[in-house]
Amino acid sequence: MHIVVCIKQVPDTKIIKVNPKTNTLDRSSAPAILNPYDAHAVEEAVRLRDQHGGKVTVLSMGPPQAVNAIKKCIEIGADEGVLISDRSFAGADTLATSYALTKAIEKIQKSEPISLVLCGKHAIDGDTGQVGPGIARRMTIPPITNVLQIEKVDLNESKVEIRRKIENGYEIIESQMPCLLTVEKEINEVSYSPLPNMIKAARYQPTVWAVKDLDDVDMSQLGMKGSPTIVGKMWPPAKSEGAKRIEGDAKSQVKQLVLIVLEKRELFEQKGGR
Amino acid sequence: MNFEDYRGIWVFIEIKDGKVAPVSLELLGAGRELADKRKSQLAGLLIGDGVEEYVQTLYEYGADTVYVYDDPLFNHYRTESFMRAVFDCCEKHKPEVLLYGATANGKDLASAVATDLPTGLTADTTILDIEEDTGLLLASRPAFGGNIMATILCKKYRPQMATVRPKVMKALTPQEGRSGELVRETVDLKEDDIRTKVLEIVRETTKKSSIDEADIIVAGGKGLGSKAGFELIHQFAQVIGAAVGGSRDVVEAGWIPHQNQVGQTGLTVTPKIYFAIGISGAIQHIVGMQNSGLIIAINKDPDAPIFQTCHYGIVGDAHEVVPLLIKAFEKALDRRVSHV
Ligand SMILES: Cc1cc2nc3c(=O)[nH]c(=O)nc-3n(C[C@H](O)[C@H](O)[C@H](O)COP(=O)(O)OP(=O)(O)OC[C@H]3O[C@@H](n4cnc5c(N)ncnc54)[C@H](O)[C@@H]3O)c2cc1C
Ligand SMILES: Cc1cc2nc3c(=O)[nH]c(=O)nc-3n(C[C@H](O)[C@H](O)[C@H](O)COP(=O)(O)OP(=O)(O)OC[C@H]3O[C@@H](n4cnc5c(N)ncnc54)[C@H](O)[C@@H]3O)c2cc1C
C-alpha cells in the first residue's frame, strides 16, 4: 500500500517569544521542528508499510528549509519526500493550504495510486486541525479525524477499521480506502531511528516542486489570494491587566477572596450542600 | 456573491448523551447577541435521528428558528452525511454566520463544510463579536500554543464560519414557553452513498478524571511541599465540590495521577473557576488553563509568573491560607467534610 503523510515544519511553540513592540511572533526565537503530531503520523505509516508492504511518501508545503523536517521523516523510516515550495503558496490559510497539498497528492498518485493519506491532529503553530479534512474533501475521500488506533487493514476488501476519539470515549469506524486519517499522539510512540535510516536521511535530497511542476493549478486558489480568512489584529494573551492582588493579612485575604468567589454562587448551589 | 442574500446567525446543534450539548446552548447565547446586534434572526441547525424533541429547548435558549434534518441516516455522527445536510442548508437558506462547538465532531464537520462551500473557517475561537453595519465577524483565537491571540476575518466570503471552544461563551437563562419556527428539511442521500460506518460506540464510564468537565478546579503545584502537604488541595476541592488538578512536576513526583495534569502535555481545561495554588505558572502550565473564567492564584513568591495570568492573586503561604479558605468556605457553604 502507498501511504502519503502530510507533514509541516513548525516553530517550537514551547520556546517561541512574542516581540513586545510589534505583537508578532519572533520566529527566530524558536528552532524549526517537525510538527510533533506529524512524527506520529509518519511512525504509523512506517509501521503499516512494514506490516503490509508498500511505500511511504511524505509531503510538505513550506519554505526551502522545510527539507529538514522531511529528512527527519526519512530518519523515522519514510521512503520518499516531496517538498512543494513557491512564493505563490505564501500566506495560505487552511483552505489554500489544502488546495496546494491536494494538487501535489494528485501528482504523486499519478505514478502510484494511494491507499491512505495521514495527517497530524493539528499543527502546533496554526493549531486549527482543518487542513486534513480539507484535503480529504478535495480528494473526495472520507476524512476520519482524531484517530487513536488503526484496528484493522483489509487490503483485499480495501477497508480499514479505525478507533476514533470522541468526547468521553471512542467509536470504531469502518471506512473504505482510500481515506484520510488525522492522528492523535496516543496512536504510537515514535521509536528511536535505526542507524541506517539516520545515514540515509543525512544524504537524502527530497524532490522539490514549484507551482509550475504541478498540473491543472488554478492560481487564484493559492496563497493569500486563495485564502478566505485573513489574520487581523494580534496581541499577547491577556496578562497582568486583570490580575488584582488581594492585600492584607491571611485572614482578611481569605475573607475578600470568599466574597469574590461566591459571586459565582450558582456554581456551588447546583451541587447541593451536604 | 451578493452579501445581502446572507442573513441570520446560525448555530450547529450537537446532541450528547441524550441532551443538547452544553456548548451548543452556550453558542445560542453568544449567537443571540450577534443576531441582536445585526437585527437578524438566530437559528439552530439540528441534525440527527429522532431529534425533534430538542427543538423546544433550543427556542427556550434563544433560537428563533430551528432547521431540522431528522433521518435514520443521521443516527450517528459521520462527516459525509452530516456535511451534506449542513452544506445543503447553507446553500438553500444562506446564513451570514455559522458557529460550531470546537468539539471533535464540530471541528471535523466545520472543516469539511468550509472546504466544499468554500468559505473561511476560524478555529477554536474564544472571543466573538460582529460589526453592526457590515456584518463582519470578528472571531479571535489563541494560536502558537497559546502564545498569541489573533482576530481572524473573512471579508470576501459568506457564510462566515467559526468553531468556538466549549465553556467560553455563556448560555442564556432559558425562557420557559418561548417558541419559534420549525423548518423541516431533507437530504437526497442514501446509506450506500456513505463510505463509512460506525460499528461501535464506547463510552468510557470509568471516567479517568472529570477535570476536563469540572466547573471548578483546584490545582496544586510543587509549592505544597510534599504528597502529605498536597492533601490540603484535596480537602479544599472536596469542600467546594471541585475537581483536583496539578502541574506536571507534582505528577512526576507521584502526588497525583497523570490524568489530572493540566498543561501542554496534560489537559487543556476551561472551568469557570481555577485555583492555582503553589504553582509557579510556567508557560506549559498556562496554556492548559488560561481560558478559565476566573483564575485565582496563591503563591508565596510575589514575582511568580502565575500572577501575570491570574485574575486575583494572594501572595501568601499555602499552608496558612488554604486551611483558612477551607474553614471559610465550610462556613459560607454550610458544608462539613471529614478531615482525614
Ligand atoms: C495566528 C494565526 C491564526 C490562524 N488562524 C487560522 C484560522 O482560524 N483559520 C484558517 O483557515 N487559517 C488560519 N491560519 C492560517 C493557518 O495557520 C495556515 O493555513 C497553515 O498553513 C495551516 O494551518 P494549521 O497550521 O492550522 O494546520 P493544521 O490544520 O492544524 O494541520 C493539520 C495537519 O495538516 C497537515 N499540514 C498542515 N500544514 C501543512 C503543510 N504546510 N505541509 C504539509 N502538511 C501540512 C499536517 O499533517 C498537520 O498535522 C492562522 C495563521 C496564524 C498565523
Ligand atoms: C516539554 C515540556 C512540557 C511540559 N508540560 C507541562 C504541563 O503539561 N503541565 C505543567 O504544569 N508543566 C509542564 N511542564 C513543566 C513546566 O515547565 C514547569 O516545570 C512546571 O509547571 C512547574 O510546576 P510547579 O509550578 O508545580 O513547580 P515549581 O515551578 O517548582 O513552582 C512551585 C511554586 O510554588 C511556590 N511556593 C513554594 N512554597 C510555597 C508555599 N508554601 N505556599 C505557596 N506557594 C509556594 C513557589 O514560589 C513556586 O512559584 C512542561 C515542561 C516541558 C519542558
Image (tube, coloured by chain):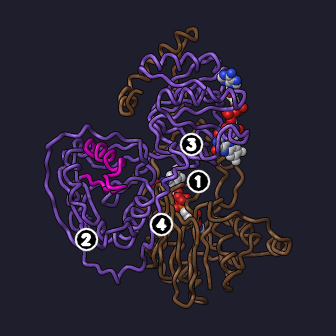
Is residue B303 something one can see in this rendering? Answer: no
Say which residue label 4 marks. Answer: A171
**Secondary structure beneath disc 3?**
loop
Label 2 is found on which chain of the structure? B
Is residue B292 something one can see in this rendering? Answer: yes
For the residues beneath circles 1 and 2, the answer to whether they share a chain is no
For the residues beneath circles 4 and 1, the answer to whether they share a chain is yes
Total numbered circles: 4
Ligand 1 is within 8 Å of the C-beta of the residue at disc 1: yes
Say which residue label 3 marks. Answer: B288
Which residues make up the magenta segment?
B9-34
Q: Which mark is residue A125?
A: 1
For the residues beneath circles 1 and 3, the answer to whether they share a chain is no
Q: CA distance from mark 4 to mark 2?
A: 20 Å
At label 3, the amino acid type is Gly
**Secondary structure beneath disc 1?**
loop
Label 1 is found on which chain of the structure? A
Say which residue label 2 marks. Answer: B71
Q: CA distance from mark 1 to mark 3?
A: 16 Å
Residue B154 horizontal side relative to residue B69, left or right: right
Say few, some or many: other residues with alpha carbon within 10 Å of mark 3 (under 14 / 14 to 19 / 20 or more).
many
At label 4, the amino acid type is Glu
Q: Position of residue A115 (x, y in %)?
A: 56, 83
User: Mark 1, mark 3: which one is toward the viewer?
Assistant: 3
